[in-house]
């Protein structure tokens, strides 16, 4: 019967000490049994040869060399979510390239110009209803009267809005939505955000879109007609709006080096002008970086 050999009680402390000292005991002799002096001479010789080699800067993530990056990405306060916004913007561009633009071009090719104008007038006439509501919410009673009168004139004499008679008699078309109403009462625009399928917006305007949707006559009317009529009318409205942009998209492509940045700045400036009725205050905070 084999007899187990018990390790010496001094062996375990000796091994632990060797590990904790980083192999200090190995400094007494080299792997080939040569003396420490011979090892030091060999190391010095190798170092003298390596001194002639060009040195390279160590590059890599922080966890490799504990060095911070030379620069950090900076984003403006108006667009702190720019990396995500750009990805959504690219997605929307792909949807537009493969779906919306071809459909809009087909729509313009099929629809005669007078009929296309009539369809646009009808939707614009229906839009005067929520415009009147937001004018009332902002206590702009004069503008509310103008918008409501436009709707009455175009809905009756203009044959349900097919003909825009109101503009011809001096009733100005206004542009108001719930996002502007929130801004009128001091709600800040908040960071810029790109919504999937819907495009440029802000945190304030994104919330306002919910109210705009539930007060849209096309959306409300879809509950009182056959189920298939609402989607048809809604898609026609979207297509008509996209077809109207075909006239200016070439100018946009030629004028902007960075299409994302151009659309962002144009959207924010336009919304600022709309909220303050064309007289926005100078805001220096938008120019600061974070």
Image: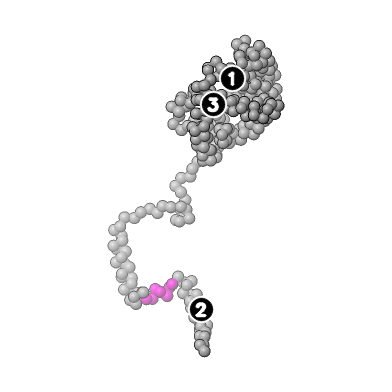
Report how far apart the C-alphas of labels 3 and 1 lie in the structure. 13 Å
Image position, residue 9 (x, y; %): 52, 83
Q: Which quadrant of the figure has residue 157?
A: top right
Identify the mark nearer the N-term, 3 or 2.
2
- Residue shown at 68% from the left, 17% from the top: 148
Image position, residue 37 (x, y; %): 33, 74
* 61 on left or right of 189: left
Badge 2, how many Cα within 10 Å: few under 14, some, many 20+? few
The reply to whether dot 3 and dot 1 touch (C-beta < 8 Å) is: no
Question: Is residue 217 shown above or below 258?
Answer: above
Question: Is residue 200 shown above or below 6?
Answer: above
Badge 1, how many Cα within 10 Å: few under 14, some, many 20+? some
Specify how the rendered protein is coloured.
one colour
**Range shown magenta:** 23-29
Report how far apart the C-alphas of labels 3 and 2 lie in the structure. 80 Å
Badge 3, how many Cα within 10 Å: few under 14, some, many 20+? some
The reply to whether dot 1 and dot 2 touch (C-beta < 8 Å) is: no
Label number found at residue 242: 3
What residue would you read off at disc 2? 12
What is the tally of numbered marks visible in this picture?
A: 3
Identify the mark nearer the N-term, 1 or 2.
2
Q: Nearer the viewer, residue 236 or 255?
A: 236
Can residue 6 be seen in the rendering of this structure? yes
- Residue shown at 31% from the left, 55% from the top: 54
The reply to whether dot 3 and dot 2 touch (C-beta < 8 Å) is: no
Image position, residue 131 (x, y; %): 66, 22
What residue would you read off at disc 1? 119
- Residue shown at 48% from the left, 71% from the top: 20
């Amino acid at each position: 019967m084999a007899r187990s050999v018990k390790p010496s009680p001094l062996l375990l402390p000796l091994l632990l000490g060797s590990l904790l000292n980083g192999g200090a005991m190995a400094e007494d002799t080299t792997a080939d049994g040569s003396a420490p002096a011979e090892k030091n001479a060999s190391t010095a010789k190798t170092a003298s040869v390596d001194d002639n080699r060009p040195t390279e800067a160590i590059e890599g993530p922080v966890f490799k060399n504990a060095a911070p990056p030379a620069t950090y990405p900076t984003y403006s306060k108006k667009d702190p979510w720019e990396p995500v916004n750009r990805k959504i913007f690219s997605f929307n561009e792909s949807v537009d390239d493969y779906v919306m633009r071809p459909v809009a071009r087909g729509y313009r090719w099929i629809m005669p110009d007078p009929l296309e104008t009539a369809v646009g007038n009808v939707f614009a006439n229906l839009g005067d209803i929520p415009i009147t509501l937001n004018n009332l919410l902002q206590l702009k009673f004069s503008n509310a009267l103008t918008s409501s009168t436009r709707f009455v004139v175009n809905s009756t004499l203009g044959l349900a809005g097919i003909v825009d008679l109101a503009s011809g008699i001096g009733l100005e078309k206004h542009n108001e939505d719930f996002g502007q109403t929130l801004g009128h009462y001091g709600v800040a625009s908040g960071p810029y955000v790109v919504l999937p399928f819907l495009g440029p917006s802000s945190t304030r305007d994104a919330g306002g879109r919910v109210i705009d949707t539930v007060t849209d006559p096309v959306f409300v009317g879809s509950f009182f007609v056959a189920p298939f009529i609402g989607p048809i009318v809604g898609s026609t409205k979207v297509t008509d709006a996209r077809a109207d942009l075909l006239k200016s998209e070439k100018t946009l492509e030629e004028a902007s080096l960075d299409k994302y940045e151009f659309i962002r700045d144009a959207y924010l400036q336009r919304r600022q002008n709309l909220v303050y009725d064309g007289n926005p205050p100078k805001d220096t905070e938008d120019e600061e970086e974070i």
